[in-house]
Amino acid sequence: MITVGMIGAGRWGGNWIRTLASLPGTQLRCVCDVSPAPLERIRQQYPTVRTTTRIDDLLEDPEVDGIVIATIAPTHFEVARKALTLGKHVMVEKPMTLTTRDAVELTELAKRLHRVLMVGHLLEYHPTILQLRRMVANGELGDVHYLYQQRLNLGTIRTDENAWWSLAPHDISVANRFLGGAPISVQCRGQSIVTPNVADVVYAVLEYPGAKLAHVHVSWLDPHKARKLVLVGSKKMAIFDDAADPKLVVMEKGYFKSGDIISLWQGLTNHPMPDAGEALAMEAQHFIDCIRTGNRPISDGEAGTQVVSVLECGQRSMDLGGAVVAIPPLASKSLAA
């Protein structure tokens, strides 16, 4: 039995609590939040789970193996560092930290202490994304030339972080996965509509080695909800639309050249059925399995650091009015390994 504690009982933390409480082979031992109100709800729903407003009550509990952190982003670094230092395995929500330097420090600390460090890049655990990863890995789509993603809604408008930091980590992590590593440059343009200096909509272009591109469009001020990924490969093209049915469409479309003549071709259209499962439940199970086996998580500290690096450089690009900003290679030897 793996015993876990939860820090943060807000809206998303509540989803984690529900998931952990029902996960086989897992005991949700304690929930911590600075506000007493959500803890009262936890006590009513899960009477066997301890609650506290003091983080140290949870972190210093020798019975707790792992910690899930779903607090506000500015607290991630300090809470995760303390949890790792006290010997806990850590799953920290996105963004992992607010600076690349802090992300590198957490990653190296986890390696030094032989602790699991996992980042909440939820989209990487979506059954359709996992299926697309298998298709790319076995060459079914051919070489992936470019991709684009949309994460739009008329949703929660934040004032403490912009749409880039709030929404784009999911899309950056997926782009990195499909295009084989970290981008070399980023160009971002944002527009602050509701709150001054807080971008509600962001358009970003990421350039990867081999002249491959990814385009990311995020907004919480949009008339319709969109969660879409389009992959354009040399053999096939795929559309993952999480708001559609079916969610995945794979099309045999492309081009070929004969001398100076370019011809387009179109074959079959398929609707592969991904494996069943809820992304959050699969993410939570992956964290528990990594604690049990010592295996490296899919969204480990290195992956989280790469995403934070893109976020940080993308913010610099926005601050410079949309200039192209080079993304420096990560200096840490452990991250380059």
Image: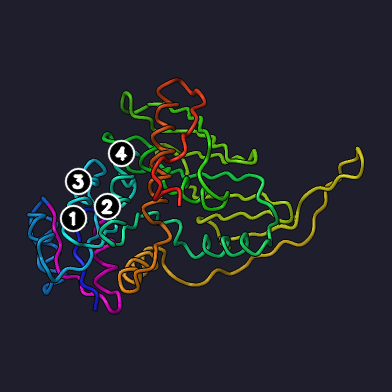
Structural crowding at the residue carrying mark 2, measured as other residues with C-alpha within 10 Å and reported as few (<14), some (14–19) or many (≥20): some
Mark 4–mark 1 Cα distance, whole angstroms, equals 20 Å
Q: Position of residue 146 (x, y in %)?
A: 63, 44
Kind of element beneath mark 1? helix
Write down the region rendered in magenta: 13-33
Mark 3–mark 4 Cα distance, whole angstroms, equals 11 Å
Report the disc number at residue 109: 2
Q: Where is residue 26 in the image (x, y as percent from the top left)?
A: 25, 75
Q: Which of marks 4 and 2 is nearer the N terminus?
A: 4
Q: Mark 4 points at which residue?
A: 98
Structural crowding at the residue carrying mark 3, measured as other residues with C-alpha within 10 Å and reported as few (<14), some (14–19) or many (≥20): few
Q: Mark 1 points at which residue?
A: 85
Asked whether the residues under the numbered discs 2 and 1 touch, taking CB atoms below 8 Å apart as contact, a structural biologist would say yes
Amino acid type at circle 3 is Glu
Amino acid type at circle 4 is Leu
Q: Earlier in the sequence, mark 2 or mark 1?
A: 1
Mark 1–mark 3 Cα distance, whole angstroms, equals 11 Å
Image-based side of 9 in relation to 236, left or right: left
Q: Which of marks 1 and 3 is nearer the N terminus?
A: 3
Image-based side of 6 in relation to 318, left or right: left
Q: Earlier in the sequence, mark 3 or mark 4?
A: 3
Asked whether 17 falls inside the magenta stretch, the response is yes
Q: Mark 3 points at which residue?
A: 78
Labels 4, 2: front one: 2
